[in-house]
């Protein structure tokens, strides 16, 4: 009944959805030239041939799945690859990093007519969903057309699982539509199974298989020349409130290390200017978005897609989202780039990876600004200690790189057995 009610409300909610999209567009969160794609109108023709459609909600999901799609294209050259995302920033990232031949479209809003237009045009033979974004109309219509669906890198937090348990039959119906669920961890697998998912296999976390973050080699040389050997650390992918912790660390250390350079990378670049004018104002920070160079004490790298540059520039990296209870971000990114890793107590998004890094001495957990400052000081002051931590993390990151093979092996039967999708007269979810 809940799914039927959802379909009815989304069918009747056209004017409200249109208003919602216009408001997002006014805030710069929708691409005005491609807005029709959000209503299911394709932005390009569909080439002939079998097509795999992969949906990744935003930047993090897109980053994790792009290596998989690149390998898919290499091993299945006759297939087309369509990737949908829902944000302007993810579209920009896909434009910069996508393998040759990949088609990008914005995902349609989860309204029956928009979904129908999307599926009628693209006619996928296989659908891959990434992580945790479950849209009932998209899932229902895809399943009703007989298109095999696999949830890859599936994530189900305790909080999300608790929410779904309020509507157990709805959760079960949605999860039963997937032919296979490949969760990130054993804990995720257990939550999916408890919610009624019938086919679950743990093959590893795709974020473990991501290649080193890209960077501009010439830009790195210019930054290194400006930094010129100064002690340098980076607080990366920071969420609101964590910039204040980074500021406190800088103020504690600069008394002992007068030439210290603190790099601050907001998780969402648009926060950089606001932080520079409020919480970090007393440090007179420089802003990359304004064309500044890091020749002062604090540098805010408020640009998109340059984290690989700053992980390579710094000797020590704090992984953000771990002090602000946001669950942390991928620690294997700095592990592959030679930065010693620090993090806070809230890393539930990558708990197994952080636990493994800590177990081999490849990362250190800090509880607050005071303990972080002590750790940054120790690692900047003791190069053998820092190198030992960096080497341990790099070895673990290399060992985690086989996940792609495992996931592709799990997908092989669905690739081999995929048949052209047919359109029923009235697509509907199985409820």
Image (cartoon, helix red, strand yellow):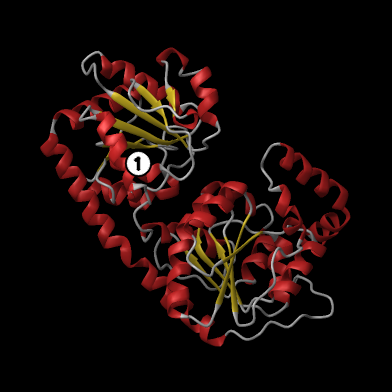
Q: Secondary structure at mark 1?
A: helix
Who is closer to the viewer here, 157 or 385?
385
In the rendered structure, the answer to whether residue 389 lies left or right of residue 276 reads left
Q: Residues within 10 Å of mark 1 (few under 14, many from 20)?
A: few
Coordinates of residue 328 in the picture (x, y in percent): 43, 42
Residue displayed at 75% across by 70% down: 429
Coordinates of residue 36 in the picture (x, y in percent): 76, 56
Residue displayed at 73% across by 48% down: 32
Tell me the quarter of the picture where residue 107 sits.
Answer: bottom right
Tell me the quarter of the picture where residue 288 sits.
Answer: top left
Tell me the quarter of the picture where residue 1 sits.
Answer: bottom right
Number of on-image labels: 1
In the rendered structure, the answer to whether residue 368 lies left or right of residue 56 reads left
Residue positioned most to the left: 384
Residue denoted by label 1: 219
Coordinates of residue 27 in the picture (x, y in percent): 70, 36
Residue displayed at 74% across by 63% down: 137
Who is closer to the viewer here, 310 or 198?
310
Does residue 341 appear in the picture of this structure? no
- Where does the C terminus fall, quadrant-wise? bottom right
């Amino acid at each position: 009944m809940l799914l039927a009610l959802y379909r009815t409300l989304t069918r009747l909610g056209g004017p409200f959805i249109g208003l919602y999209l216009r408001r997002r567009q006014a805030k710069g969160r929708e691409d005005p030239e491609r807005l029709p794609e959000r209503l299911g109108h394709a932005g390009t023709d569909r080439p002939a041939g079998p097509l795999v459609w992969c949906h990744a909600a935003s930047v993090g999901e897109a980053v994790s799945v792009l290596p998989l799609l690149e390998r898919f294209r290499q091993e299945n050259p006759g297939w087309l690859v369509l990737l949908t995302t829902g944000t302007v920033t993810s579209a920009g990232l896909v434009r910069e990093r996508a393998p040759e031949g990949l088609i990008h479209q914005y995902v349609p809003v989860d309204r029956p007519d928009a979904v129908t237009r999307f599926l009628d045009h693209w006619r996928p033979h296989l659908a891959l969903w990434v992580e945790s974004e479950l849209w009932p109309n998209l899932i229902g219509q895809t399943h009703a057309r007989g298109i095999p669906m696999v949830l890859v890198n599936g994530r189900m937090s305790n909080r999300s699982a608790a929410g779904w348990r309020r509507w157990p039959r709805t959760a079960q119906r949605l999860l039963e539509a997937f032919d296979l669920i490949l969760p990130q961890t054993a804990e995720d697998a257990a939550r999916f199974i408890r919610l009624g998912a019938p086919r679950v296999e743990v093959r590893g976390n795709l974020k473990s298989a991501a290649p080193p973050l890209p960077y501009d080699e010439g830009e790195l040389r210019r930054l290194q020349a400006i930094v010129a050997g100064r002690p340098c650390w980076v607080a990366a992918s920071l969420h609101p409130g964590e910039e204040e912790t980074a500021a406190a660390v800088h103020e504690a250390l600069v008394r002992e290390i007068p030439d210290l350079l603190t790099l601050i990378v907001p998780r969402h670049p648009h926060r950089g200017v606001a932080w520079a004018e409020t919480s970090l104002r007393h440090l007179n920070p420089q802003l990359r978005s304004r064309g500044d160079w890091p020749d002062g004490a604090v540098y805010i790298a408020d640009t998109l897609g340059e984290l690989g540059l700053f992980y390579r520039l710094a000797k020590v990296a704090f992984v953000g989202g771990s002090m602000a209870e946001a669950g942390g971000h991928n620690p294997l990114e700095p592990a592959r780039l030679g930065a010693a890793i620090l993090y806070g107590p809230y890393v539930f998004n990558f708990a197994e990876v952080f636990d493994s890094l800590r177990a081999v001495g490849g990362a250190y957990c800090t509880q607050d600004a005071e303990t972080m400052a002590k750790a940054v000081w120790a690692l900047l002051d003791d190069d053998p200690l820092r190198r030992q931590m960096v080497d341990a993390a790099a070895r673990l990151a290399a060992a985690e790189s086989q996940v792609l093979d495992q996931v592709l092996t799990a997908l092989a039967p669905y690739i081999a057995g995929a048949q052209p999708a047919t359109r029923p007269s009235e697509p509907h979810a199985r409820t």
